[in-house]
């Protein structure tokens, strides 16, 4: 009998991702929510030897509205057009939405979809998540004794991106304004 209980625990027991989702489900159910993180990128040409971390934040709302800030760049969407602003050049580029990227961006915000993602534990202790299409290796790493998400590693071809210091929050509003009155705009639609 003990063997059967052990087998059922292995097959149907929760994993750190399910526990993490349950712990954050109140935030995930909110209309406006955000994730803040530090990003480190490595490629075959750049290994990040100086340990440069870029700060990032993604805030999402209803109807494909979002604000994505990464370093000096900000991309916003009102659900119809995307505007990309770079503070170094003080320029805004307006374009049609990239539907595939938009789908990927919103994939983590729906509780039911998040819970239904295929997950597989790997030998390195990470949990591989099937997300963002083929050719991507996405792994979530948790503290061994808690539900704390330590990092998410995304490997795409010869590029490795590591998200760390990840925090989730519910937000009161979603700010879609970017630039200022002296900003140059270019409509690429």
Image (tube, rainbow, N blue to C red):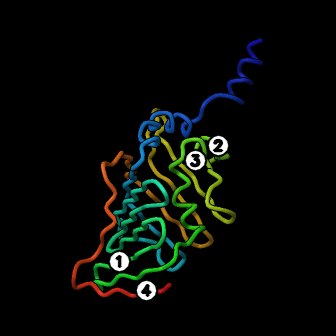
Q: Nearer the viewer, mark 4 or mark 2?
A: 4
Q: Is residue 100 above or below residue 182?
A: above
Label 3 to label 1: alpha-carbon separation: 35 Å
Callout 4 secondary element = strand
Q: Earlier in the sequence, mark 3 or mark 1?
A: 1
| Res 187 label | 4
Residue drawn at point x = 43 percent, y = 86 percent: 187
Q: Nearer the viewer, mark 3 or mark 2?
A: 2
Residue in front for this viewpoint, 88 or 85 = 85
Residue drawn at point x = 36 percent, y = 66 percent: 69
Residue in front for this viewpoint, 55 or 96 = 96
| Res 126 label | 3
Question: Label 3: how many residues lie within 10 Å, few (<14), some (14-19) or many (20+)?
Answer: some
Q: Marks 4 and 3: in contact by CB < 8 Å?
A: no
Label 1 to label 4: alpha-carbon separation: 12 Å
Name the residue carrying label 1: 85
Q: Is residue 17 above or below residue 12?
A: below
Q: Earlier in the sequence, mark 4 or mark 2?
A: 2
Label 2 to label 1: alpha-carbon separation: 34 Å
| Res 124 label | none
| Res 116 label | 2
Callout 2 secondary element = helix
Q: Nearer the viewer, mark 3 or mark 1?
A: 1
Residue drawn at point x = 46 percent, y = 36 percent: 147
């Amino acid at each position: 009998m003990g063997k059967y209980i052990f087998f059922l625990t292995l097959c149907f027991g929760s994993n750190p991702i399910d526990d993490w989702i349950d712990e954050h489900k109140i935030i995930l159910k909110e209309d406006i929510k955000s994730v803040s993180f530090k990003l480190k990128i490595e490629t075959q040409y750049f290994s990040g030897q100086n340990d440069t971390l870029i700060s990032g934040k993604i805030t999402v709302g209803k109807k494909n509205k979002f604000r994505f800030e990464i370093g000096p760049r900000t991309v916003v969407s009102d659900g119809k057009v995307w505007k990309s602003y770079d503070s170094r050049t003080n320029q805004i580029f307006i374009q049609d939405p990239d539907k595939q990227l938009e789908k990927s961006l919103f994939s983590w915000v729906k509780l039911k979809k998040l819970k239904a993602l295929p997950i597989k534990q790997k030998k390195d202790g990470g949990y591989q998540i099937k997300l963002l299409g083929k050719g991507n290796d996405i792994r979530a790493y948790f503290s061994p004794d808690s539900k704390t998400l330590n990092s998410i590693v995304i490997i795409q071809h010869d590029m490795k991106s590591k998200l760390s210091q990840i925090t989730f929050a519910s937000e009161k509003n979603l700010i879609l304004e970017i630039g200022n009155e002296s900003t140059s705009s270019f409509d690429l639609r």
